[in-house]
Image: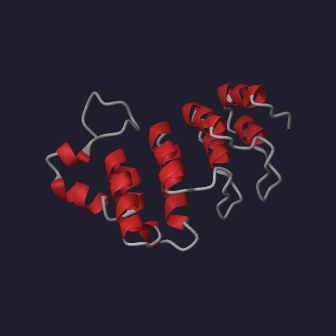
Amino acid sequence: MPSGQPTGAPTNLAQSSNSELFANATKDLFAAARSGSIEAIETVIQEAAAAESEVGGSGGNKVAYSALVTAIFDGSASLADVLVDKAAIPIDDAGVTGNTPLMWSAIFCKTEVMSSLLKQGASVTMVNKDNETPLVLAKKAGCAAGASILRKAGARK
């Protein structure tokens, strides 16, 4: 990532000198999310739609969900928003662990992503396979700011 650029900030790889990196990112949704490029993510999704195939060749949109968790881990609300919207990932979709995107943002204490997901209608009451809510996960992670955001959104448990 170029120096001086905030971590997780979207980049425009199309303008980058590394055309091979951009070419690889536009073939795979997970690689596109790792690149931090909204343009790469949109390219992958548009090409999949044009080919009438699932994004990234995923069954059950698992690649899209993994890309979303990656964007959350990187703290990129803008990438997460694009993935939820354009890859049509249900806002309360749960992965193998039963964690929803909001739960992952609580675990990683990514408050900007958490706020964005809540604005899109993420549920504060869902529980994962361990019967933990996003609020419980935020508290376990020591994420006081996230716990506060979740309480303001109506979380009680």
What's the image's color scheme?
A: secondary structure
Residue 139 quadrant: top right
* The one of 31 and 40 positioned closer to us in this rendering: 40
Looking at the image, which residue sits at the far left?
17
Q: Position of residue 126 (x, y in %)?
A: 79, 49
How many marks on residues?
A: 0
Q: Is residue 37 visible?
A: no
Q: Position of residue 11 (x, y in %)?
A: 30, 40
Looking at the image, which residue sits at the far right?
157
> What residue is drawn where x is 41% and y is 38%?
8
Vertical order, 91 against 111 (above or below) = below
> What residue is drawn where x is 55% and y is 66%?
62
In what quadrant of the picture does the N terminus appear? top left
Q: Position of residue 151 (x, y in %)?
A: 78, 28
Q: Position of residue 130 (x, y in %)?
A: 80, 56
In what quadrant of the picture does the C terminus appear? top right
Residue 47 quadrant: bottom left
* The one of 142 and 134 positioned closer to us in this rendering: 134
In the figure, is residue 94 to the left or right of 32? Answer: right
Q: Is residue 133 visible?
A: yes
In the figure, is residue 23 to the left or right of 116? Answer: left
> What residue is drawn where x is 49% and y is 71%?
58
